[in-house]
Image: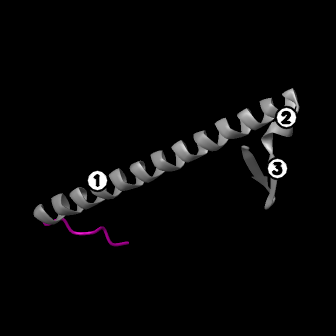
């Protein structure tokens, strides 16, 4: 018996109407897209850190001085 939990309350999905099933599928789709987006953000953050680290190495290699006001 498939279940869904909403606001910490479990419901039997077999009792949903056709419209309820459509809403459930839409909710599941959105949740999967959110998870995918979170994973993409983590990948972008990791790549960003790699680029920052490589840029720091290049700056150090060139012995660049910071700009002072």
Crowdedness of circle 1 by 10 Å Cα count: few (<14), some, many (20+)? few
Separation of marks 3 and 2 at Cα, in angstroms: 12 Å
Q: Which residues are magenta?
A: 63-69
- Which label's residue is closer to the chain start, 3 or 2? 3
Q: Position of residue 19 (x, y in %)?
A: 86, 29
Q: Is residue 6 left or right of residue 42?
A: right
Relative height, residue 16 to residue 42 (above, below): above
Which residue does the numbered mark 2 point to in the structure image? Answer: 20
- CB under 8 Å between discs 3 and 2: no
Q: Report helix, strand or loop for mark 3.
A: strand
Where, quadrant-wise, is the C terminus in this rendering? bottom left
Q: Residue at x 73, y 34 (%)?
A: 26
Q: Position of residue 1 (x, y in %)?
A: 73, 44
Task: Select label 3 or label 2 by which is in front.
Answer: 3
Q: Residue at x 24, y 57 (%)?
A: 55
Instruction: Specify whether residue 8 is painted magenta.
Output: no
Q: Which mark is residue 51?
A: 1
Q: Which mark is residue 11?
A: 3
Separation of marks 1 and 3 at Cα, in angstroms: 47 Å
Separation of marks 1 and 2 at Cα, in angstroms: 46 Å
Chief secondary structure of the magenta portion:
loop
Question: Among all residues in the image, which is located at the extreme top?
Answer: 18
């Amino acid at each position: 018996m498939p279940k869904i939990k909403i606001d910490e309350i479990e419901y039997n999905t077999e009792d949903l109407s056709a419209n309820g099933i459509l809403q459930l599928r839409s909710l599941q789709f959105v949740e999967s897209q959110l998870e995918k987006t979170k994973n993409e953000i983590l990948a972008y953050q990791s790549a960003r850190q790699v680029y920052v680290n490589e840029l720091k190495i290049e700056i150090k290699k060139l012995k660049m001085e910071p700009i002072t006001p």
